[in-house]
Amino acid sequence: MSENIEIIGNYDKIPDSLPPESHIRLTLHPIDMISYWNRVGLTADFIANFYTYNFEQNNDIQNTLSTILNELVENAVKFSLAKDSEVSMDLKKYAQIIKMEIRNETPASIQKKFRDKVKKLHEEDLEQLYFDHLESKKEGDDQSGLGLLMLAKDYPVELGFRFEEADNGKYRVTVRAYIDLRDL
């Protein structure tokens, strides 16, 4: 592994070489998503519906998948390097597991803050982090991070993160979420 790549969490649960049963790839532009914020939710709902179409009582499963994807895409859009850059979504289904991969580029300063939050998610007690976050909001701290914390704390999802140094102080950030449909 190169010195300029850092992996946190369960990033490689399913190897890239394993062929999926189903594959969806989308590229979004943050400026489009910001201008029409509802498109983030529409995109998440579409993909969740696509993957849960054949399930009986799929509303709970669909809502869970949509919520997870929506949060990951919102973060990638909000924290992209440039609003005309690309956010890529790569979703693969392997039997009962869906692998969501969201990638964007971000400035080094934002990447560092995000990386530090991600490390806390994997090193500290999630209940205590949640309580501390709520307390800091009450005291006027407007830092984000609640959505990702809630995903890790309240949803049956395994998260993995890859931080890769690109050019001129930019970082490529890839978030992978693994959801076992049998857990929903």
Image (cartoon, rainbow, N blue to C red):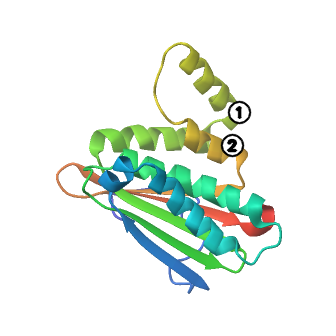
Q: How many marks?
A: 2
Q: Quadrant of residue 135?
A: top right
Instruction: Quickly name the residue at label 1.
Output: 127
Check disc 1 and report its element: helix, strand or loop. helix
Q: Position of residue 32 (x, y in %)?
A: 33, 55
- Along the polypeptide, which appears first: circle 2 or circle 1? 1
Q: Are marks 2 and 1 in contact (CB under 8 Å)?
A: yes
Q: Is residue 156 visible?
A: yes
Check disc 2 and report its element: helix, strand or loop. helix
Query: Residue at 62% across / 52% down in the picture?
Result: 67
Say whether residue 57 is left or right of residue 63. right
Q: Amino acid at mark 2?
A: Lys
Asked whether 37 or 144 is in front, the reply is 37
Query: Residue at 30% across / 52% down in the picture?
Result: 31
Q: CA distance from mark 2 to mark 1?
A: 7 Å
Image height of 61 relative to 115, above or below = below
* Label annotation for residue 153: 2
Q: Position of residue 13 (x, y in %)?
A: 60, 68
Query: Residue at 69% across / 56% down in the picture?
Result: 64
Q: Quadrant of residue 163?
A: bottom left
Quarter of the image where the C terminus is located: bottom right
Say whether residue 184 is left or right of residue 48. right
Q: Position of residue 85 (x, y in %)?
A: 26, 58
Q: Quadrant of residue 93?
A: bottom right
Query: Residue at 36% across / 41% down in the picture?
Result: 112
Q: Position of residue 21 (x, y in %)?
A: 62, 86
Q: Amino acid at mark 1?
A: Glu
